[in-house]
Image (tube, helix red, strand yellow):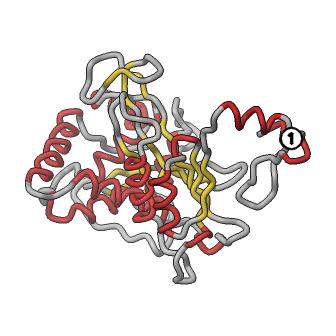
Amino acid sequence: MGVLHASTHLPERITFTVKITSFHIDTPTTSQLCSNAGLMLLAQAADRVGVADAIDTALGDLQKPHLVHTTGHTMTSLALALALGGDDASDIELLNPLVAAGLIDQIPSDSTIHRRYKELHDSEDDDHNGPELINDASTTAVLAGMNTARASLKNPLVIDIDATEVTSHSDKEHARPTWKKHFGFHPLAAIIDHGPGLTGEPAAVLLRPGNAGSNTAADHITVLDQTLSTIPDHTDGHDWGRRLLVRTDAAGGSKKFINHLDQQGLAYSVGIGTFWQIADIASTLGDAVKQGIIRPDGTISDIDDS
């Protein structure tokens, strides 16, 4: 299979391809108990935007026909297990309570997950980039429903680019000592900021070893370009221009990255590291010249909260 199928009515714009195995999401009844009921919201969201089907469509003939658990189905199941705190293929068993309750009818085994992973790895050897196709397909599916019409010069679509450290307890692939004296990974992510009260939307993630640099311009450019390739065109048909605002901390404050932003014609708010002499001068100018952070809607935050 590979498709999430909900028992509720789906919007007409969602079209599912019929496959062998269905990933059936049922509506809980008053007599059913579910220890992870919040997961159903995430599962229904993946269903509605067609994440599994988008992955299978993007892979095309890179996967064998008539699979019981397609790559789209497997990756979606893994995402649900990840949301429950899983960090290994065997943690797919975290979904078993939902299967037992009758809310989900089938999940892949950990051996099936490893087979799908090997198939993707082998597709790279054949000059295909399976993982990249999955990333593009899933991101495009999630962003497809984004309201791009509302973005304007005064209220731009905001993309935050920042790195985060992920610790590792063992010497796994690409795990390295970090500058904070930890051991693990240092991925760089682009997150779409939908504004106060709303969640962020991951648009691109560059997996990197723990010793990857914080202000590596090439990595920032890669993540930005990946993000721009997945964001739908603005509904008016024109380039995003300064209606798309890219924000980074001082890690993005390199000439090469800023020049790239200029070449793309995008708006940006980038932190710049300064010498102590400049900090001393700034501290003597008084509160009259200080300003809070400019929010996406154009309002300015309180200086004490900045």
In the image, residue 55 lies at what x, y percent? 30, 58
Residue at image location 21% in from the left, 54% down from the top: 130
In the image, residue 229 lies at what x, y percent? 40, 65
From the viewer's perspective, tell me whether residue 157 is left or right of residue 108. right
Count of numbered badges drawn on the protein: 1
Q: Nearer the viewer, residue 153 or 150?
A: 153
Tell me the quarter of the picture where residue 22 sits: bottom left
Residue at image location 64% in from the left, 70% down from the top: 151
In the image, residue 230 lies at what x, y percent? 42, 63
Task: Classify mark 1: residues with Cα within 10 Å, few (<14), some (14-19) or many (20+).
Answer: few
Q: Amino acid at mark 1?
A: Leu
Find the residue positioned furthest to the left. 126
Find the residue positioned furthest to the bottom. 237
Name above or below for residue 79 compared with residue 123: above
Helix, strand, or loop for circle 1?
Answer: loop
Tell me the quarter of the picture where residue 173 sits: top left
Tell me the quarter of the picture where residue 176 sits: top left
- Residue, disc 1: 285
Q: Nearer the viewer, residue 46 or 153?
A: 153
